[in-house]
Amino acid sequence: MTQPRDFGFDEETSMLKDAVKRFLDEKSPLIALRKHLAGSEDPYHGEAREPWFDRALWQEMTELGWHLLAVPEANGGIGMGLVAAAAIQEEIGRAACPCPLTNTLQSTFLLREANAATCLEKIVAGESMGLAVFGEDGSLEVDSTDVTVNGTTLSGTSWYVQDASKMDNFIVAAKSAAGIGLYCVPASAVEIKCDKIVDLTRDQARIVLSDTPADVISAPGEAEAVITKSLSAIYTLLAADIAGAAEWQLQATTEYAKFRTQFDRPIGFFQAVKHPIVNMMIATDETRSLVYNAACAYDHEPETAARYAHFAKSSASDTASFCSNRSTQLHGGIGFTWESDVQVYHKRQMHSQFLFGDGSWHRQKIAQQL
Amino acid sequence: MAEQQLSADKVEFQEYCRNWLEVNRPPPTKIPLPQAAYEVTSEDHRAYLCDWQNRCYEAGLIATDVDKAYGGHGHDGYQTIASGEVRKAKVPYFINWIGLGMAVPTLLVHGTEEQKTRFLPPIFTSEEIWCQGFSEPGAGSDLVSLQTSAVKDGDNWIINGSKVWTSLGALSSWMLLLARNDKDDKYNGITYFLAEMDQPGVTVKPIHKMTGEAGFNEVFLEDVVVPDHLRVDEVGAGWKVAMSTLTSERGASMGVGAVASSESPLSAIHQVIQLAKDTKRNGKSVWDDPIWQDKIVKLYERTEAIMQNARRGRIKELNGGAMRIPLQGKVVGSEIGQALNEVALGIMGARSSLYVGDENAVDDGKWALGYMNTYTGTISGGSSEIQRNILGERVLGLPKTK
């Protein structure tokens, strides 16, 4: 199989991406999040509070059908591929928008690999769904879960569950003597213990299960293959988010360098500032190209999907680190303050950089196949 | 890697190119060719490479999309296919890369009918090799400060001055020449000429590089005569014309089939991986060390990214502006190439000291040679620093450094 040269980025996808961008620019300005975080009319001061997202905004997103975008038509969805999902995720990253869409899209691709019709139909009905697959040690291997299964009830704690407080359901990885299985539990059936995390734009929790009844998505022994295949989509979506956020960092730093004057000139005149900004652009573009290649490989060329997804996330993790570093440094003192939005993106990128594997981890996975 | 989805006639043309290159691949030279076209100095190599380029031209792999009136083959949209197949086939490069890559695009845009009919066909056949006379001892990155003078004398211009870093200078019949007709107007006082090399007053002296190879030259111009009909575009328009030529050099133009190096970036990566697997230290292969894996795969990742950049650059909705990706090509490609060659030296450890001519040198010493020659890529045609100024200013709109 071969990939279409244009990534399969057709007119429909292009219009969708554009609509998402306009929607988020209008309805999800960063200041809304910041006002909530501050808990006051002055959005730029005060203490970080509980995880938050705009439920009305999520409601609007589901009315527009973004949640079921990648659900197959046979299950009542729109049946678009990972290229379209990555295009949307890139805009979510650029807007640093707190919403359950990222996890729901990631879950959709896992459920597609598992042919899990019942769960896909829950997504179609507007329910959000998140992944609960990590164990306490933060290992990134597919069998790292600390949850155990006994018949169809789950016990134990699942760690580092992303945007847990926003979720209606969780896909939980659990182990038994027969191997790893995947299960669906409603959020109402578990205890959610929020972590205090560095990223202000997302939340994270442990979810605690004790003899919690669960629906089987993939039986023990079958789930590892499902997880392995869907990880390519999961990595690629996270890399798309990073590419979008990196573009924000690039544009914000560029604008600041045009506006901020020192030594009687805008600082962007000086090559010590200009060249690192160009390096941010180079890094961002490399990641973005690898994201669309990986997404297109997943849609059209499954035999290369895993390698290209590792390339996308390895590049993205390094770009997240580099662009965050330069954006704070080049903003000078102001970039180091709570008041500046630069810190919000920097911390979102710090979170994304290590989530689902950093650059070196993904490069090891590639090297093992060479 | 993704294949382009081509129409039936293009698929047929691609098949044709592939087969022709397979059947007509020339036998290797007795003394190996230098790594890139700009390093060719020997007469044997010149004759071999001119013959090869001419055969490729006659087969339709060069000047594929150029109008028949100028010696081209008159197709539309076939050149990228032909060039792609030439790169994949790992055949020798085209010696007249300056002619193909810079003179032809410049003349197609700025040349007169007479200039196009006279000069293009012998560029394609390589009957006439071209060099570029832009840089001067006092005008490198700050090219616009060039001082070589052009003084009008009847129907002629009299040229005096000197040019430097002139690749292929000793083999060339013609030079793309920038000279100053007005000392008082920095940007609008430069004129673009086509200068014949075989005439009194032109002296070419080789410059030896850090590698020990020759390859480029100093060219001294003393009362050299250029007839006015060999002026390109208006008097004083030279800077504008030169910028369009440099854009070709920096990879932003479609080109007419210039392939200056026969090594594809991915093939270089795979060679380095193989080198790491074959190199044993303390009984273990270097490849088995995760530190080396990480370094090599990072460069693999970035090389893949360059290829995917080229693909995304063609999609208007995803490229962030027409020039954003093309203008990154030269700086990123040359820096990755340099890093890759340096990694190869590290893989070999102490053996990396063995240079060309040593009987124990790995791959005949080509990695040390190649590493040093990568500085050609990061310095010439606008150094990496100049490229970053251009990207910052033209793409991001940052204030101009100059």
Image: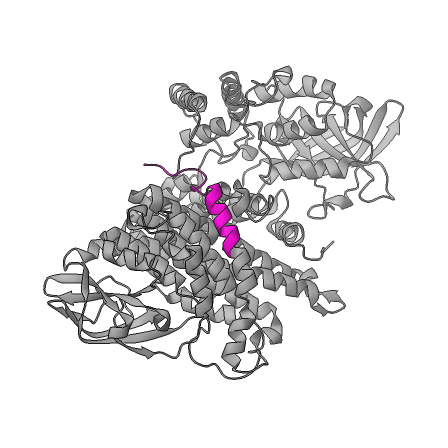
In depth, the one of A7 and B105 nearer the eye is: A7
- Residue B158 occupies quadrant: top right
- Quarter of the image that includes the N terminus of chain B: top left
The structure residue drawn at horizontal position 42% and vertical position 49%, both measured from the top left corner, is A84
Residue A301: where, in percent of width, then height? 33, 41
Q: Residue A206, how many percent across, how many down? A: 29, 75
Q: Total of numbered circles in the picture?
A: 0
Whether residue A213 is situated above or below residue B230 in the rendered picture: below
Q: Is residue B317 above or below residue A190?
A: above
Quarter holding residue B397: bottom right
Q: Is residue A19 magenta?
A: yes
Write the residue at 87% across / 29% down. B152
Q: Is residue A64 visible?
A: yes
Q: Nearer the viewer, residue B270 or A302?
A: A302
Query: Residue A172 is drawn in which quadrant?
Result: bottom left
**Does the magenta portion include A84?**
no
Q: Position of residue A91 (x, y in %)?
A: 49, 57
**Residue B278: % across, % down:** 29, 46
Asked whether A178 or B227 is in front, the reply is: A178
Which stretch is magenta?
A1-20
Q: How is the image coloured?
A: one colour
- Residue at 73% from the left image edge and 32% from the top image edge: B177
